[in-house]
Amino acid sequence: MCWRIWHLARKKKQLEWEDLQRLTNRRLEQEQGRKDVTEDMSEDLSEGEKGDVLGETPTLDSPRKRFQRNFSNLEVWSDSNKEKKLYIILVSLHGLVRGENMELGRDSDTGGQIKYVVELAKALAKMPGVYRVDLFTRQIASPEVDWSYGEPTEMLNTGAEDGDDADLGESSGAYIIRIPLGPRDKYLRKELLWPYIQEFVDGALAHIINMSKALGQQIGGGQPVWPYVIHGHYADAGDSAALLSGALNVPMVLTGHSLGRNKLEQLIKQGRQSKEDINSTYRIMRRIEGEELSLDAAELVITSTKQEIDEQWGLYDGFDVKLEKVLRARARRGVNCHGRYMPRMAVIPPGMDFSNVVAQEDTADADGDLAALTNADGQSPKAIPTIWS
């Protein structure tokens, strides 16, 4: 027994040392690559751009100007958007998703993310200028779960509460759209859904094409109304949203909720499983692949904290904090980025409840990448990102 304990302790230290070596080598490579890229791209930067890259903040006259500087390619949601009639898609594949009587905590896949995306869909549909919001998820017709998860469509709300009846067509509002994904008669945990992603994408494309034609007859003057943005939640939905975004040429937004590389590091540090066992149990490498693909396709990534940006997304090949600042500075000034691209990261505090969010009549605050929203008590929840223009 003593020998076994000594051997396990020795094995754990060896794994920790190997992990430390791997991280050190990776950071050295990233630092060198970042240094080379920054030097190459700084040759034709103006003095103002160089100051921005180094983190120097010039003096601004007002918070409003600061908002315009930091988020110059994002438009504040205001009264001018009320005349728009946008079609928005959210994607959240795993778990049990329904609008009422949510079974939160039933398993590890049915938790806070389910409530988050449902309340987000409801709140978005109430925004002036948004005509329809579809929340795509998996259809499950299994005796293991309630019959409601097998219904193809579920209405969440009818849209803007203060809108005129003339503005509310038969297809307006927020809906849960359940698409077949894998075996229909069996509930699967998220790690087992990866082989069926393409099946979901095919079904989602068929729905989008049909809905775009229907919306075209209602609000598009006979021309199809295509989605304005596709927002994926978690790695599996991000993978799907990236494929949909590419097929439709529609901007993509990503919310990771939790990240595979960070989880892999934590599990390796525990020393209870080998990397092969971890991958077999959690399909962690396929998840990381999906997250990298999502980063390549996304224009905006919603995060919970600054730490998530620096220490979690910073582990990914598709995102580098310093290089993103350089690219953003160059893009604002119309300077050549040499074909390089990196998504914007925006922080929204965790634990937001969208159920009491109502549209605000005036323009957004100057806090950053947020829509003009307010709670019933008049306090800004900082909940919904301004991702439309």
Image (cartoon, helix red, strand yellow):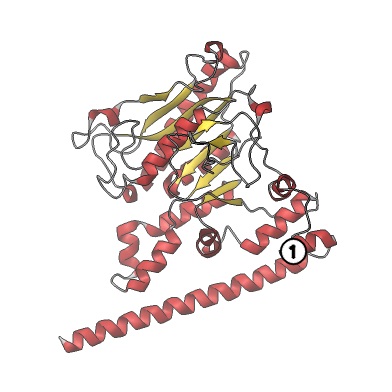
Q: Is residue 139 left or right of residue 248?
A: left
Which one is nearer the viewer's eye here, 55 or 252? 55
> Farthest residue toward the left?
1
> Farthest residue toward the front?
377
**Mark 1 surroundings: few (<14), some (14-19) or many (≥20) residues within 10 A:** few
Q: Give the residue drawn at x 74%, y 48%.
A: 62
Residue 180 place in picture, x, y as percent: 35, 33
Q: In this view, does 155 lie to the left or right of 79?
A: left
Q: Note whether residue 151 is visible.
A: yes
Q: Give the residue drawn at x 33%, y 72%.
A: 270
Q: SS of the residue at dot 1?
A: loop
Q: Give the residue drawn at x 46%, y 50%.
A: 350
In the picture, which quadrant includes the N terminus? bottom left
In the picture, which quadrant includes the C terminus? top right
Q: Name the residue under label 1.
A: 56
Q: Note whether residue 337 is visible.
A: no
Which one is nearer the viewer's eye here, 389 or 306? 306
> Is 50 drawn above or below residue 25 in the view shown?
above
Count the marks: 1
Q: Give the residue drawn at x 40%, y 64%.
A: 264
> Is 139 drawn above or below residue 165 in the view shown?
below
> Farthest residue toward the top?
166
Q: Is residue 127 left or right of residue 117?
A: right
Residue 302 place in picture, x, y as percent: 53, 48
Residue 11 place in picture, x, y as percent: 31, 82
Which one is nearer the viewer's eye here, 30 or 85? 85
Mark 1: amino acid: Glu
Residue 163 place in picture, x, y as percent: 54, 18
